[in-house]
């Protein structure tokens, strides 16, 4: 009997390779994540439906679409955000993420085009509670001469308030904050405990399982010598466990900037409360080469067996893109990658007191870190950089905006205005980062079984996540040993993907045969966004001599372009209209799919693979500012870009023996 194939009949695992079912564009990628064993229930089997239930979704416990969220956002409770004038609190941030219209700190109405599904609110822990008291001129602030100076500068507003904020941040980074203020706003002090309780209770109030997930979290703000080594922490738990503790800080004498201090806190949290927590490393391109150390020391620590074990245990996720630059790759590290020069920030550290060197770059960008992880695993037995990938905004406005035409920027001082592009993000005698270099990025998509704290947290632990620079593209990525072109003959590739392989974030088991691994990829454009240019696989590997390599493969592209003799696909074209800040989807594709087999596979070489999806060119946020405010843009401002998505990798480890 031939299998029945139609849009109204389930494509079971046995039929997946022979059916050309058209289940609708929306289900191309966004169905069947999680458990690949589509076993009928006992009741169904006894009712004569042992082959498969009529409904293709019956007996499934996995999602049909990704859940979109934010892992890094600050309200006015954060030291720097409040000093720059953010008056929004957690309630405002949660309501905005859920799709409500709010009023920004500069008095502008603002709303997302589409609500988020989940969020982690990550206010800074150091001097927790200080910023609102600074704004209000509380006695605890005015009692210190420096605190009074900062209050008076803040109240003057404008440029003076900006200078005050930078002075405060500089003192924090250099650990020269007044001792009285540190003691008054540290763990054990009432303002600190009160603020933590406020954060926890706000998250619980807005948590709505099945509809919107509000995670309790914070940012651990390690910045030794101005080197950005921040981590964001997400708790799987509610207030019963979260209020048994207070978060850690980095300022002495209560804190420390070494990540071991954070990892020890995470261990203690789990042991004390029975809860669970993870940490996400902050985008590393302002870390002065310290975010991904190798055999080198890092501010007093050493990359040894203990380091790699603890980092692998507590940091399963990395923030690859955000407002302060994109951190996937860099032209110096990847000269053969024509798309590696995307929103790079080449400054040494946060206060611009260190010049960037070529040596630093290799310990700041995700692709190089993934490669170095292979080498560290060979040396120390554990890969500390085996992370899933996501994006975030790191906005300090309380507003998680990653849309080019709706970008409320990094801080209150550069919310939409005719002059915001004129303000540098930061400047020093050694260099400056201009306002137009800020990036409207990014979001994290999670393949979770349901929209709850537990399910999303578990997806992070599995590394079943991907990042985008803002658009909500669908992306599936599976690796195995038996995928072939017939597996594309379905509108539901995830069914066969889970049946025959592992999803993004997974590990390929060593193959018993001699063949190379094959990969099933599928991408779907954002329904209200731009068409897709191409889909690529990025491979990194280590050879027998320990040398590290990478290669970018174009595996699917639009418009019938021909790959040249060097394996390169020509540019997709450009439909951007700068005068109207728009583009036309007359080029590109709405979806791309491929089964790709590694042509350069060596079973003796450890490797990783991840997917990069590029949109066709679209306007950057500065073009929308020009249109709305009638301003002239700096000649050096980048006007057009190609937004993108990055999957979490799939790793291959050779069999031992």
Image: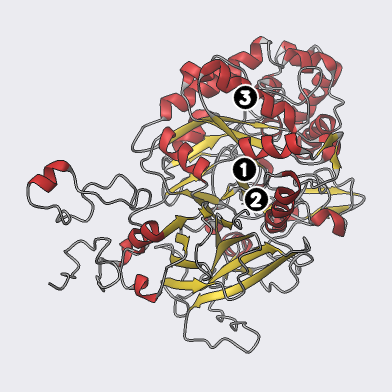
What residue is drawn where x is 68% and y is 10%? 188
Image height of 366 relative to 568, above or below = above
Name the N-terminal-most of marks 3 and 1. Answer: 3
Tell me, for residue 267, which label it has, or none.
3
Q: Residue furthest left?
A: 47
| Mark 3 residue crowding within 10 angstroms, few (<14) / some (14–19) / many (20+) | some
Residue contact at pointers 3 and 1, CB within 8 angstroms? no
Image height of 475 relative to 282, above or below = below
Q: Residue furthest right?
A: 429
* Residue ID for mark 2: 323
SS at mark 1 in the image: loop
* Residue ID for mark 1: 395
What residue is drawn where x is 68% and y is 34%? 310
Q: Quadrant of the N terminus?
A: bottom left
* Residue 325 percent across, percent down from the top left: 69, 54
Q: Is residue 576 visible?
A: no
Between 507 and 193, the one nearer to me in the picture: 507
Name the N-terminal-most of marks 2 and 3. Answer: 3
Image height of 495 relative to 191, above or below = below
| Mark 2 residue crowding within 10 angstroms, few (<14) / some (14–19) / many (20+) | many
């Amino acid at each position: 009997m031939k299998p029945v194939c139609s849009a109204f009949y389930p494509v079971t695992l046995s039929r997946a390779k022979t059916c050309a079912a058209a289940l609708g564009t929306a289900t191309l990628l966004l169905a069947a994540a999680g458990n690949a064993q589509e076993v009928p229930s006992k009741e169904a089997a006894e009712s004569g439906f042992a082959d498969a239930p009529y409904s293709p979704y019956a007996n499934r416990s996995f999602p049909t679409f990704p859940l979109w969220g934010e892992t890094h956002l600050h309200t006015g409770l954060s030291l720097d955000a409040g000093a720059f004038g953010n008056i929004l609190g957690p309630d405002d941030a949660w309501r905005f993420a859920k799709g409500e219209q709010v009023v920004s700190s500069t008095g502008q109405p603002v709303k997302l085009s589409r609500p988020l599904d989940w969020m982690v609110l990550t206010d800074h822990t150091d001097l927790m509670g200080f910023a609102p008291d600074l704004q209000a001129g509380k006695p605890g602030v005015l009692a210190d001469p420096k605190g009074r100076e900062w209050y008076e500068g803040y109240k003057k507003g404008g440029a003076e308030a900006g200078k005050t904020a930078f002075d405060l941040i500089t003192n924090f980074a250099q650990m020269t904050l007044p001792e009285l203020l540190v003691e008054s706003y540290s763990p054990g002090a009432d303002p600190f405990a009160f603020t933590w309780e406020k954060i926890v209770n706000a998250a619980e109030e807005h948590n709505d399982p099945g509809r919107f997930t509000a995670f309790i979290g914070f940012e651990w703000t390690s910045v030794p010598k101005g080197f950005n080594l921040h981590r964001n922490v997400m708790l799987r738990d509610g207030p019963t466990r979260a209020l048994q503790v207070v978060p850690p800080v980095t300022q002495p004498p209560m804190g420390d900037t070494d990540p071991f201090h954070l990892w020890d806190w995470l261990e203690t949290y789990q042991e004390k409360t029975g809860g669970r927590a993870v940490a996400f490393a902050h985008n590393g391109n302002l870390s002065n080469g310290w975010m991904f150390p190798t055999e080198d020391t890092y501010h007093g620590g050493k990359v040894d067996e203990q380091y790699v074990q603890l980092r692998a245990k507590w940091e399963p996720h990395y923030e690859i893109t955000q407002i302060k630059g994109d951190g996937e790759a860099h032209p110096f590290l990847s000269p053969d990658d024509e798309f590696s020069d995307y929103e790079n920030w080449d400054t040494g550290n946060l206060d611009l007191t260190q010049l960037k060197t070529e040596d630093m770059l290799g310990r700041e960008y995700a692709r190089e870190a993934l490669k170095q992880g292979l080498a560290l695993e060979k040396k120390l037995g554990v890969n500390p950089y085996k992370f899933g990938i996501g994006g975030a905004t790191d906005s300090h406005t309380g507003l998680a905006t990653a849309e080019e035409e709706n970008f409320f920027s990094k801080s209150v001082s550069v919310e939409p205005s005719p002059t915001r592009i004129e303000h540098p993000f930061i400047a020093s005698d050694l260099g400056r980062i201009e306002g137009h270099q800020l990036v409207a990025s990014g979001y994290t998509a999670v393949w979770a079984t349901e929209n709850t704290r537990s399910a999303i947290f578990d997806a992070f632990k599995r590394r079943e996540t991907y990042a985008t620079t803002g658009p909500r593209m669908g992306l599936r990525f599976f690796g195995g040993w038996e995928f072939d072109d017939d597996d594309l003959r379905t509108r539901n590739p995830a069914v066969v993907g889970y049946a025959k392989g592992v999803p993004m974030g997974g590990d390929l088991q060593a193959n018993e045969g001699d063949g190379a691994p094959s990969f099933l990829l599928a991408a779907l454009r954002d329904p209200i966004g731009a068409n897709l240019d191409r889909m690529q696989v990025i491979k990194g590997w280590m050879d027998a001599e320990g040398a590290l390599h990478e290669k970018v493969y174009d595996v699917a592209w639009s418009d019938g372009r021909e790959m040249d003799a060097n394996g390169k696909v020509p540019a997709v074209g450009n439909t951007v209209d700068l005068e109207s800040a728009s583009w036309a989807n007359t080029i590109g594709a709405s979806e791309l799919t491929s089964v790709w087999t590694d042509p350069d596979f060596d079973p003796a070489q450890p490797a990783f693979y991840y997917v990069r999806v590029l949109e066709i060119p679209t306007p950057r946020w500065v073009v929308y500012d020009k249109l709305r405010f009638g301003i002239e843009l700096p000649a050096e401002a980048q006007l057009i870009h190609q937004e993108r998505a990055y999957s979490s990798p799939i790793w291959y480890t050779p069999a031992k023996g």
